[in-house]
Image (cartoon, helix red, strand yellow):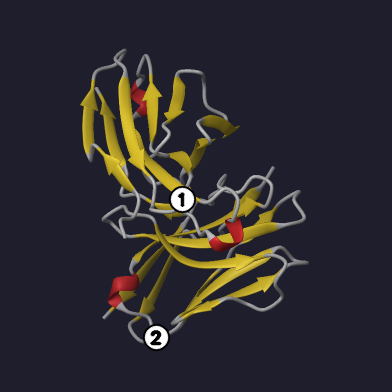
Amino acid sequence: AQTVTQSQPEMSVQEAETVTLSCTYDTSESNYYLFWYKQPPSRQMILVIRQEAYKQQNATENRFSVNFQKAAKSFSLKISDSQLGDTAMYFCAPTGGTSYGKLTFGQGTILTVHP
Amino acid sequence: DAGVTQSPTHLIKTRGQQVTLRCSPKSGHDTVSWYQQALGQGPQFIFQYYEEEERQRGNFPDRFSGHQFPNYSSELNVNALLLGDSALYLCASSSYRRPHNSPLHFGNGTRLTVT
């Protein structure tokens, strides 16, 4: 079984600034994957970044990077140079290696980027 | 390269009726997972299909059933609709045998309203 906690229901940031969204999780699997998805008002679930738990190096994808602390079961998302288009609901979601595709989503963090 | 496609976009049904939602996976993907997302909540895993069989199932009643076809497309069926079944239904696709090369991609979803 997996659980996810996103402790920040809402966050706001000024355009061009940096913001960090937090996520803690629990899983019984030894091999797993972690995802951050964004869901704008258009409702499409868009993959932001993926981390494989066996990799120690933190994943990066352009302005998005993660701080993966495996022992602490923490998986935070840093957005640099925030843009208005980053305004969305952000979800953290792990999935196990033996149950790949069964994502467990947190409650989400609403991020608003202000001009 | 077509992404994950879902149909219909919106659907309105009456309590007690039955509904069928459809999903075509991303090219090269063979596994389809279905999620239910209530308003303001994170998605909840319903079930996953691979090789035309249900491989994993979440905590949903038997009223929720599915099917996968030889071309990997999938259907979600919900019988005896309840008002509480009103939600956004999301489909995600992946590759069963190559999860490390296969980030989960979502479709735009089907908005089901039960009156």
Which element is circle 2 on? loop
- The chain to which mark 1 is attached is B
Q: Residue at x 35, y 50 (%)?
A: B4
Q: Which mark is residue B29?
A: 1
Of the residues shown, which amino acid type is indicated by label 1? His
Residue annotated with mark 2: A81
With A87 as the anchor, is B12 left or right in this view?
Answer: left
Instruction: Kindly identify which chain the residue marked by label 2 belongs to.
Output: A
What element does badge 1 sit on? Answer: loop
- Of residue A52 and residue B16, the one placed in the foreground of this image is A52
- Asked if residue B35 lies left or right of residue B24, the reply is right
A59 is higher (above) or lower (below) than A53? below
Kindly indicate the quadrant of the structure image that contains residue A85.
bottom left
Look at 40% across and 43% down and name the residue there. Answer: B91
On screen, residue B87 above or below A78 = above
> Is residue B46 visible in this depiction of the protein?
yes
Q: Which residue is nearer to you in this view: B40 or B100?
A: B100
Instruction: Tally the marks.
Output: 2
Give residue B102's position: percent from left, percent from top. Answer: 52, 59
**In the image, is A33 to the left or to the right of B84?**
right
